[in-house]
Image (tube, rainbow, N blue to C red):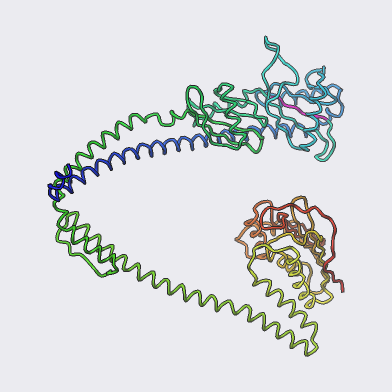
Amino acid sequence: MRGLFLKLSFRMKLALVFVITLILSAVSVGFYSFHSARKIVRRDQRKTLAEITNLIIMNIDGRVGSLTRQMQQAAGSELMQSYAKQLPARASPELKEYYEAMENALGFVHAVYVVKNRALYVPTEDESVAISATDYSVLWSSAENAQSNTVWQGAQAPLHLINETSTGRQENVIRAVQGIRESPDGPLDALLVLELKAQEFDNLLFSNRASLAYQYRMIFDQNMQLMAANRRFDDETLGKIVEEYTHGERRFTVSTPHADFYVQGQYDGLTGWSVFSAQEVMSTFPSSQELIELIVQFVLVSSLLASFSVVILSWTITRPVKSLSRAMKSFEQGDYSVRLNPKGSDEMGQLMQSFNFMADEIDQLINQVLRVSLAQREAEIMALEAQINPHFLYNTLDSIQWMLIKENQFEIAQVIVSLGKIFRYSIDRDKRLVPLVNEVEYAEHYLNIQKYRLDDRLLYSVRLPHDLHACLVPRLILQPLIENAIAHGADDSSVVTVDVVARQENDLLAIEVRDDGKGMSEERLAQVKEMIEDDRFSSHLGLRNVHRRLRLQFGDPYGISIVSADNKGCSVTVRVPLFTEERDGKMLNKDKLLLIGQSES
C-alpha cells in the first residue's frame, strides 16, 4: 500500500489527502454541530426554565405583597383594633360587614381569625374556639418578633377544621400572621390570622403562559414542605430535589426510574419560600434524531462535492505552492519586505494577494507598536516628572511656616501647618478608605483655618467614640459638610456653632455635622434634597459629590440625610457601613466617647 502511494503523482497524492481530510473534517463538523446544537437548545431551554421560575416568584411576591397590604390595612383599622381590645365582646355590625368584605377580597380563604387569650374569634360568629397553648405561643411569639410586619408561615395544619372531609381531616393551609397594635411600637392586643387554601398559589403555577405542558412547577415553604404544584413527583424524587437544594445546589439533575429531569430552584427572599421548575432532559431537544439524519446527509453530499472539486483544482495548487513556501520562509526569518507576484485570479492567486496584504498589515503593525512603545515611555517619564510638583508645593509650605516662626507669626504659621497637612492628606491617594480618626483629624485642620478666618464668630466641637477610631470611611467626606455648615449656617455678623459627632447605629457608622444657624424652610429643604440626588443642578456640589460617592461605593441606603427647620439650624448626617478593614468585618459595639477637639473661644 505504501509503495502504491509513493508511485502516485504529487497531484494525486495531494487530491487523495485532501479528500480524506475533507471527509474526516465533514464528519467532525457534523458531530460537533450536533452536540453544539443540542447544547445550545438545552441551554436555552434551561434559561427559559430559569425565567419561568423567576416569573413564578414575581407572581408569588406580587400576590403575597397584595395580601400583606390587605392584612396590615385590616389590622390597622379602628374597627379591628377596637374589637381586639374588647374581646371576648361581640363584634359590631360595622365590623361584621367590614370582615365579610375583607374575606371576599382576600381570595381562596380557608378562614380569617382574630386570636387572643388562646381562642379563635370570627367577628361574624358569636362562639370562639380554643386552641392549644403550643399553637398560641408560636403565633404570638412570631408576631412579636416581626413587630409590625406580616409573618408568612407557609404550609400548616389548620387551627380549626372547617367542613371536615370523610377522613376527618383537611389539607394543609398557607398561614399568615399579623399583629394588631394600637401603634407600631405598642404592645400586641391580638393577632389577625389568615389561612389560605392551596388553590391560591396553584393558580399562579397554571396561569403562566410561558410554561410548557411537560414541566413540573412546585412551591415549597421555608420548612421545605410542598405547598402547591401543577404536577407532583413521587416522594423519593421530591426527597432528592430537597436534598440537592439544601446542599446549596440551584441547578441540578435528578434521576427517576423513568427519566432524568433538569431542575431549577430559586429562593424567594420576601417569603422565605423556594420555587422549583423541572423538565425532562430528553424533552429539551425533541428533534435530535431528525437533526442527526440531516447532518449525515449533509456530510455525505458535501464530501462528494468537495472531493470532486479537489480533484479538478488540485493541479492549480502545486505550481504556486513552492513560491508561496519560499516567501513564507523568508518572512519567518524576518524579511518583511518579501512580496509575491500572483499571475492569476484563482484561489492560489487570491492566497498570494492575501499573503501580500497580510505582510503589509504586519509591517504596519510592527511600526505602529514601535511608535506606541516610544509614546508610552515618554508618557511614563512625564508622569514621573509630574509627581514632583505636589511634593514641591508641600515643601514650599513647610519653608513658609519656618519663615513665619522666625518672624514670630505663630498663628499664621499654625494656619500654614494645617494647610500643609490638608494638602498632604489630599494628594495621598494610596487608599480609597482611611481610618475615621484620620478623616476627623483632616477636618480639624480645616476647622482651625476657618477659626483663624472667622475668629469669635465660629465655635466648634468634634466628638468621636474611641472605639470608632479604626473604622474605615471614604476619604474627604467631612470637609464639604463642614464647609456647607459654615457657609450657610450664619450671615456675615452672627456666630455659628458647628458640632461634629460620630456614633454607631446598629451596623452603621453615622457622622453628624450640625450647626445652630438660620436653617431652612420645608420648601428649601425639599429643594436641597432634590439637588443632591440630581446632577442637573449646579449648587451644593460638595454635598452631592459626597452623596454620590457613598451611593456608588456602598449603594442604598448609605449616603447623606438632611434635617433642618427655619431658625433651628441644620443637621447633615453621613451613614456608611461599619467595618475596620476593606472587606466585611466584625461590627463594633462600644459606647465610650472621647472628646478629640473642642473650641469655644
Residue 462 or residue 429, whichever sits in front: 429
In the image, residue 224 lies in the stretch drawn in magenta:
no
Side of 413 where 353 appears, left or right? left
Q: Which residues are magenta?
A: 190-195
Residue 296 or residue 565, whichever sits in front: 296
In this orientation, does residue 484 appear?
no
In the image, residue 193 lies in the stretch drawn in magenta:
yes
In the rendered image of this protein, does residue 118 appear above or below residue 245? above
In the rendered image of this protein, does residue 236 appear above or below residue 595? above
Side of 328 where 41 appears, left or right? right
Report the label total: 0
The residue furthest bottom is: 407
Percent across and percent down for residue 495 are: 83, 71
Percent across and percent down for residue 49 are: 50, 34
Residue shown at the point (73%, 33%) measured from the top left: 151
Residue shown at the point (68%, 52%) measured from the top left: 584
Percent across and percent down for residue 182 are: 83, 36
Q: Main SS of the magenta segment?
A: strand
Side of 459 where 3 appears, left or right? left
* Quarter containing the C terminus: bottom right
Quadrant of residue 64 in the image? Answer: top right
The residue furthest top is: 166
In this orientation, does residue 569 appear?
yes
Side of 463 where 285 appears, left or right? left
In the rendered image of this protein, does residue 492 appear above or below residue 26? below
Quadrant of residue 338 in the image? Answer: bottom left
Residue shown at the point (55%, 76%) measured from the top left: 384
Residue shown at the point (43%, 74%) measured from the top left: 374
* Quarter containing the N terminus: top left
In the rendered image of this protein, does residue 267 appear above or below residue 87? below
Quadrant of residue 358 in the image? Answer: bottom left
Residue 595 or residue 522, whichever sits in front: 595
